[in-house]
Amino acid sequence: MKLLIAKVIDMGLQMDKLRKETLAFVETNRVLGGEMGEYRYSSVVTLPTLYSSTYAVMTRSLYNDLDVLTSAERQAWIDYFNRYQDDDGLFRDPVIFNQYSYKGDYFGNGRPHLTCHILTALTCLKGVAKKSFALVKKFSSRKNLESWLESRDWGKRVASTGNEIMNLGTILQYARDFQNDARAGSAVEFLLNWLDTHYIHSDTGVWGDIDIVEPQQRSHAVQAAYHWWALYFYDHHPIPYVERAIDTLLATQNQEGGFGWGVHNSSEPYKSSACEDIDSIDPLARMSFYTDYRREDIKQSLEKALGWVKQNQMPDGGFVFMLDKAYQYGHPELNGEKNAGAMFPTWFRTLCLAYLGKTITNNPIWSFPWHFCNCPGYQFWEHE
């Protein structure tokens, strides 16, 4: 009994240490003397960015750290985000917007991508976006939505299409659930039904006109599917060919325990990125509750992945996008040094740990009370 008690105490101390280190790193990137919500991306940049602010909110939320905010602080952070919402409903980062502008029907990055992050951050803070989304009117037309879907790249750039469809779908789900827009609800239903029957392969459970026998192409296909499965899971829409999807997901794990095959790291492909890892960890964790199929294999895979994810935490308490490589997330003010923590990977790898904590019962991350956000996008667990 004493040994059991000692083990339980030690497990709790491990999680307490991880939590304190991670939150301390997030705090080092808060702009001292700035307004509520201003965070930098890393120690090597100078300007606060909205992306970095969302990463701070979402990481702190996972660790139940937002409860320390006063009601005035919480509202100030909500107001900070809402100040940057344009009249079309999409949010604009004043620092990086000129680099990532929203052009026409492209939703892969820029304001639509940022908007999805801010919607989750606002929900974590118990806030809502003030303005409605102009895109709902256009995409509530089934003709327009179907034409847009057909015009996406379903070949070698299917992973980019994954981002596009997730960003549009997430905004539509948010407009339906948080702004009571029935038109958005009909559009989401059409979108998911369309994905059920277009460009998906019954023998693999993933989408795209690419040969997934080749490991890197398999990784591209899974990265695309991860973004769409999030829409499926949030709406409790049945996953098509779920058993074959599980087979494909398990096949993405590499010998180091991560899920990289060189999509982001061609010189050292097994040093997988935060994106490659979560793109397999998230759906595997969810699907282990969805079906009994290969459940033990999934558990063993995720147990192996846990050690790899932890390796990506640095002495500064933060996490890296890739080990032994600097990584710039599309803009100089979103730059992370080699083997030094940065805000995006710290959030994404913490989110990985939270998903692993839902499935690995023999580890302290399972007993930790991870806090998820009941909002479409990245950070919900079981949407009510």
Image (cartoon, rainbow, N blue to C red):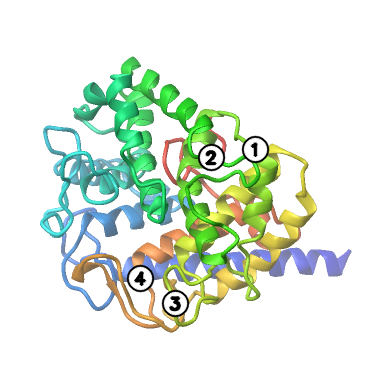
**Mark 3 against mark 4, which lies toward the viewer?**
3
Q: Which sits earlier in the primary sequence, circle 2 or circle 3?
A: 2
Q: Are marks 1 and 3 in contact (CB under 8 Å)?
A: no
Name the residue carrying label 4: 342
Separation (CA) of disc 3 from disc 4: 21 Å
- The numbered mark at residue 241 is 1
- Quarter of the image where one finds residue 138: top left
Q: For the residues marked 2 and 4, what is the alpha-carbon distance in whole angstroms? A: 35 Å
Labels 3 and 4: the sequence-earlier one? 3
Residue 190 seen in this snapshot: yes
Residue that mark 2 sits on: 200
Q: Indicate which disc, 4 or 1, sits on the residue closer to the N terminus.
A: 1
Kind of residue at disc 4: Ala
Q: Where's residue 347, x and y in %?
A: 42, 60
The type of residue carrying mark 1 is Tyr
For mark 4, does the 10 Å Cα neighbourhood hold few (<14), some (14 to 19), or many (20 or more) residues? Answer: many
Question: Is residue 38 depicted above or below 112 in this figure?
Answer: below
Q: Are marks 2 and 1 in contact (CB under 8 Å)?
A: yes
> Is 291 left, or right, of 79 in this rendering?
right
Q: Position of residue 7 (x, y in %)?
A: 77, 68
